[in-house]
Image (cartoon, rainbow, N blue to C red):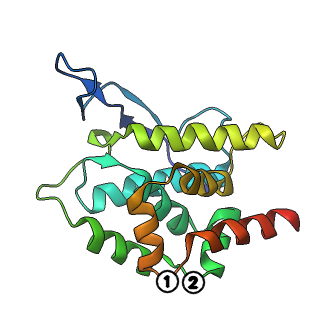
Amino acid sequence: MTSEGAAPERLIRTPTIQSRDPFTLVPGGPAILWPPGDDLFTADAKLGLARAQDEAVRLAHNHVGPVHLLVGIVCADEGLGGRALRELGANSERTRDALASLMGHGEARIAPDEVTLTPRSQRVLDLAMGRSRQRGERSAASEDVLLALLDEGEHFTTQLLRAVGIDPADVHTRVQELMDTR
């Protein structure tokens, strides 16, 4: 973290096509600024995105998938998305342990700028930005990313929530309640 509490800027890779089959994506495409340096995401969302990459590196995963984004929101410990998850019983340690149990550890260390953002994660981020715009907000916050994760419906995300004792439907309800009281 920087001295202002914001997420540090670094790089992440996008997938690339390295075959004649356009559906065969592999890690190691062009690098982009991570978390995004523009105003598409709030500071709490950016911190969650940075923590997602940290978790991928910690587990030697060569990608940031939706499940990493979920862990990032919990580990950032900021924003309404993280608050909703904490109130439902999630904490950094339990969530990180559940991710390691669910996906295991890679074999070789990996540098943060070697991690690739998966197409599903990009879809989650696009959904989050769409949610924020529907509310008339310029930037997507952690709650937008969290709700987008539920909307996207990736199996591992649901499995991870259940592994820490949280029903995905309860997440949606709690986020809405917290948003209504702002």
Residue positioned 60% across, 50% down in the render: 148
Question: Which residue type does callout 2 highlight?
Answer: Gly
Residue positioned 50% across, 38% down in the render: 123
Q: Which corner quadrant of the image does residue 3 belong to?
A: bottom right
Residue positioned 38% across, 72% down in the render: 96
Residue positioned 49% across, 54% down in the render: 153
Q: Which residue is mark 1?
A: 165
Image depth: mark 1 or mark 2 in front:
1
Question: Which residue type does callout 1 highlight?
Answer: Gly
The residue furthest left is 107
- Specify whether residue 4 is in view: no
Q: Which residue is mark 2?
A: 89
Q: Is residue 25 left or right of residue 49?
A: left
| Residue 38, percent from left and from top | 63, 32
The residue furthest right is 181
Circles 1 and 2, Cβ within 8 Å, touching? The answer is yes
Front-lying residue, 5 or 119? 119
